[in-house]
Amino acid sequence: MSAERVVLGKYPSVDALYGAARALQASGHSALDFYSPYPLPGSDEVLKLRRSPVPFVAGAAALVGVVSGVLMQWWMNDVDYAINVANRSVVPSPTWMPVTFELGVLLAGTSIFFGLMALFRFPRPYDPLFEVEAFRSATIDALWLSVAVKAEQVSTVSDELRRLGAAEVELVPEEA
Amino acid sequence: MTPPAQAAAEREALAPMPLIAGHPTDAQLNTELLAPIFSPNETWKKLVGLAAMGSGMLVIGLTVTIARGIGMWGNNQPVGWAYDIINFVWWIGIGHAGTLISAILLLFQQKWRTSINRFAEAMTIFAVMQAAMFPLVHTGRPWFAIYWLFPYPNTMGIWPNFKSPLIWDVFAVSTYFTISLLFWYLGLIPDLATLRDTATKRTQRIAYGIFALGWKGSSRHWQHYRIGYLILAGISTPLVLSVHSIVSFDFAVSQLPGWHTTIFPPYFVAGAVFGGFAMVLTLIIPARKVFRFNNVITDRHLENMAKVMLVTSMIVSYGYLMENFMAWYSANPYESYLFFVTRPFGHYAAIYWIMLFCNVIVPQTFWWKKARTSVAWLWIASILVGIGMWAERFVIIVISLYRDFLPSSWGLYAPTWVDWFIFGGTISFFSLLFLLFLRFVPSVALAEVKELNHEMQHEKAHAAGGHP
């Protein structure tokens, strides 16, 4: 299999960007991505992205937090070192609510953050994309499209990007 | 004037002030909002020097406290809780406005939050840091605090008592700090990447590159990022309400007149938002002047904050009214004595009247647009509210404790110089952290402002009947 290369095209507007992406998809390229300084409305549909797993991760983690919160308080205050106050019924105690709630939130929140890091494969301080000086504008004021192609297709795809309105086309250097 | 032109002119006249002044491009916003990071500022240097000197007071205060013990503080029977908890509640409350702005206003799609949320979130984190110092140090031997406060397996085989609101507080505050920090950092990642890509010096590129974690603005990342950010906002909302409710339980579950009140949780939360918004104004008014952020932090933002302060002030006032009503309605002599004798005419009456003046009277000026749009008055009023909210905590804590049920255990309280050093020191240290934040981190959420800018231009183009 021949090596894959990434070609970048800079587009002047969201409409031009989406138009180019649709044309590339029609000609069989699916490894596309957009880069922009802020989230672009509608990019999920154009790129045909699947639903994000983040809500499920957060929900599961919240559940783990709540259950472990209840078990922790029950085991520590009723089993391992029982605190019997006036022989009141202890399980379940309304006094457990605050800690249970806080643990649910804590686990949900941390799982969202670290879940995102795992999804993004962050931290990743180096990426061959950063070798392209012009690409720095992707986080400042420009819209870029990337397409991964086989090495022999680079020149045809570059021409295609230009024909589709790219103001600038760049080839990402191979990973060292 | 032709009717359509007249209608357009009327629309223009009635439209609220814009959230972003002028029609800046993304590149212009970038330059303008990152300017504090790339251009040194003389005023900033002087302020940092001042704040660093002030933080020295904190070092001295804490050193004396740890070396000689908490006997160096003014609190003693019957006022066993004083500056430590007053300052703890005050600082935690200040933090709440940050989460309110960043999370609750995000869920309500209040677009004006965008320019100020980063400031407010930073304020939250730094305020919670100051707050956390007090319960930690008040243990006397903070190096043992880990098993006093957290469920840590220890050789004595005992665990924290989860029926105690003080333990709930530990969980609430540490969760609040962790979630606020992650929320803040998650919001910062795209802006740190912008900073990495804007920087021209290699050291800056590397330093910001490390903290940006490799963000490239990929749409595949934005998809997960947006939903993750929204859920974090969603869970921060009940979290912020729970934190100050739990702080209020520290008092409300006891029997003492002035503490034993069911209205405490909502009244504490409203008070926290009230005091927190005041602190946001106190900080943002000079910051926007020094760093010339007037285009994105417009007078409309300040006016909206004044409106939030007016609303929360009314909730707090209602809380004061209800406390007094219940004291009368309960016919409990101890309650009546506290509310109708000790508070208004007792030894600390002046602080009670300062509280009422600052928290009830001063915000009433915000019914007038002139007051809401006068930057000077807003700044003075915000400082008065900060003082008023501190006075409120003093009234709740000290005035309830110094006259309890038995006249034989009555006694006065006075803070020592160590109390003042620690309190003054936390204000300086907070200012120091905030100043460093202004200089080294994008202090306005760049990506969000750019997004808002595009949305607004799009809407405007739509209204004019054309395409952008």
Image (spheres, coloured by chain):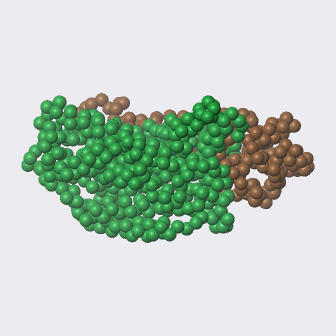
Which chain is painted in brown?
A
* Residue in the picture at 14% in, 47% down: B345
Name which quarter of the figure residue A43 lies in: top right
* Residue in the picture at 59% in, 32% down: B7
B177 and B315: which is toward the camera: B315
Q: Is residue B198 left or right of residue A128?
A: left
Question: If the image is split into quadrants, where does the C terminus of chain B sit?
Answer: top right
Q: Is residue B233 left or right of residue A173?
A: left
Q: Position of residue B76 (x, y in %)?
A: 19, 56
Question: If the image is split into quadrants, where does the N terminus of chain B sit?
Answer: top right
Q: Is residue B281 above or below residue B165?
A: below
* Residue in the picture at 46% in, 36% down: A66
Q: Position of residue B61 (x, y in %)?
A: 31, 65
Q: Single out the residue that lies furthest toward the front.
A: B1
Q: Position of residue B365 (x, y in %)?
A: 34, 44
Residue A21 seen in this snapshot: no
Which chain is painted in green?
B
Q: Is residue B289 left or right of residue B331?
A: right
B168 and A76: which is toward the camera: B168
Q: Is residue B340 above or below residue B67?
A: above
Q: Position of residue B373 (x, y in %)?
A: 43, 47
Residue A164 seen in this snapshot: yes
* Residue in the picture at 21% in, 33% down: B325
